[in-house]
Image (cartoon, rainbow, N blue to C red):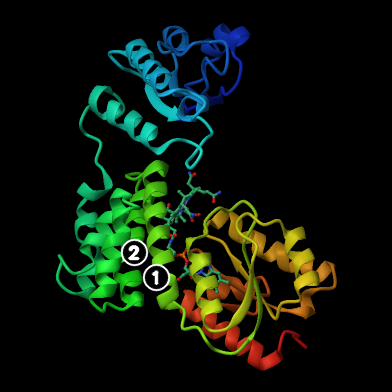
Amino acid sequence: MQGAGKLLLCHTDGENRGLMDLIRDSGMHVAESICPAPMTRVTFAEYYRHWSPRLTLYGGIPSTVVLAETSEADFEAYLDGFFRAVAPGNRLVVGVADEVPPNAIFSRLQRIGERIAREGALPLKAGAARTLETLPAARAPAAAQAAGAADDAFAQVRQDVFKGRHVDIRAHVQELLDRGTRAADILEHGLIAAISVVGNRMAAGEAFIPEVLLAARAMTAAVKMLEPHLAASGEQQRGKVLVGTVRGDMHDIGKNLVVTMLRGVGFEVRDLGVSVARERFCEEVAAFAPDVLGLSALLTTTMVEMGEIIKALEANGLRDRCRVIVGGAPVSEQFAAKIGADGYGANAVEAVRLAKRLVAEGAGARH
Ligand code: B12
C-alpha cells in the first residue's frame, strides 16, 4: 500500500489492551479515534510510548474529561499528563472523542486549543494556529464590502459571530435595532455574511467544529432577537406547514429562519426539529394534514434523504395530501425537480413566497 501512495487508517476507538502489539505491527499508518484511560484501560502515555515509533496517533482526549462529570482539577490534571506524555511531540493529531457542546464544556475545548497552540509541536507548530477573527476573510467578508465600507455598522456583530460571543452579540444587535437598522439587513450583512465566512473556512480546513459551534450559538442568539422584527405578524391564517431537517442532519439555523418567517406571515407551522426520520414525516403528514411539507438539508450526504421521504410519502398513499418544498445550502432547483418535489426555495423569503403560491394554487392537494 505504501508503494501505491496510500495510507492505511485503523479505527482504534475502544479497548485495545490485548491488541497493542498487533496494531503496532500491522503495517497501519494511523491509529485514529484513540480513546484512552480513564474510559478504557490503556493510558495515553502507554499508547504513545508503544505506537508512536510506527504509527501516527489521532485522538487522545476521552469524552468524559470534557463533560461536567469530570472536575476542573481532574481535567487540568489529565491535560498535564497528556502533554507530558507526548513531549516533545511527534506523530500526533489531538482529537476529542464523541462529545460536542452543549454537553462538552466549551471552555475546556478552548483550553485544549490554547494548550496545543502553546505546547504542541506538530502538526501545527506552536503559535501557528490561526483563529477565525484573525483570518483575512473574517476581517473583510465579501458581503460586508458589498454593503459599504469595510468597517461598516455590521462589523461588530460579525466579530461577535466569529468569536462566538453569544452574550455580547445581543447588546450589539439591540444597538443596531435602536438606531433603526432593518432586521433583514442585520441578518444579511451581519449574521449570514459572518456564518458564510465560517463555512468557507470550515471547507478550507481552517475552522473546526468547536469554533463553528461557538459561531452558530452566537448566531442563534442574535436570530432569536431578530425574529419578532422579521416576522410581520397579524395576518390571517394562511394554511398549515410542517417543517423539519432530514435524518442525519443537525443543522437548524436556516430551517428556524424559515419557520419564523412562515409564522410571521400567518402560517400555522409545526416544526419537527432536526434529524427527523422519514417515518416520522409520514406520521405527521397523516396527523397534522399540512398544506405544505418543508424539508431542510445542509449536507450533500443527507439531501438524498429528501427523495427518500417523497418516496415514503408515495408508498404510504400520502404524497397527494401535501405539496413538498425543499431547501438548504446544497439543494437546487434541479435537484428539487429530480426528486419530484413541488418547489425549491433558496432562502426564507423564497420559502414564504413558495408556500403562499402553492397554498393559493391548490390548498394542499396536488391533483
Ligand atoms: C453552522 C454550521 C454547522 C453547525 C450547525 C449548528 C446548527 N444549530 O445549525 C455544526 C457545528 C453543528 C455543524 C456540523 C456539521 N457540519 Co456544518 N455548517 C455550518 C455552516 C457554517 C453554516 C450553516 C448555517 O447555519 N447557515 C446560515 C443559514 C441562515 O443558512 P442555511 O442553513 O443555508 O438556510 C437558508 C437557506 O438554505 C434556506 N433553507 C434552509 N432550509 C430550508 C428549508 C426549506 C423548505 C426552504 C424552502 C428553504 C430552506 O433558507 C435559509 C434561511 O435563509 C455551514 C456552511 C454554510 N455556508 O452553509 C456548514 C456546512 C453545512 N457544514 C458542513 C459539514 C461538513 C458539517 C459536519 C459534517 C462537520 C463534521 N465533520 O462533523 C457536521 C454535520 C453534523 C450533522 N450531522 O448535521 C459542510 C457541508 C459540506 C457538504 N457538502 O455536505 C458545510 C457546507 C461547511 C463546509 N463548507 O464544509 N455545522
C-alpha distance separating marks 2 and 1 = 11 Å
Determine the residue positioned at 36% across, 52% down: 215
Is residue 231 visible in this depiction of the protein? yes
Report helix, strand or loop for mark 1.
Answer: helix
Q: At label 2, which amino acid type do we have?
A: Leu
Determine the residue positioned at 84% across, 68% down: 316
Q: Is residue 228 left or right of residue 252?
A: left
Marking on residue 154:
none
Q: Residue 238 occupies which quadrant of the picture? A: bottom right
- Between 220 and 320, the one lying in front of the other is 220
Q: What x and y, as percent, mark residue 175? A: 25, 68
Q: At label 1, which amino acid type do we have?
A: Leu
Question: Taking 347 as reference, is 123 above or below it?
Answer: above
Which residue is identified by label 2?
A: 191
Return the residue found at the far bottom: 361
Query: Is the residue marked 2 within 8 Å of ligand 1, measured from its CB?
Result: yes
- Between 75 and 51, the one lying in front of the other is 75
Q: For mark 2, does the 10 Å Cα neighbourhood hold few (<14), some (14 to 19), or many (20 or more) residues?
A: many
Q: For mark 1, does the 10 Å Cα neighbourhood hold few (<14), some (14 to 19), or many (20 or more) residues?
A: many
Pointers 2 and 1 in contact (C-beta within 8 Å): yes
Q: What x and y, as percent, mark residue 350? A: 49, 80
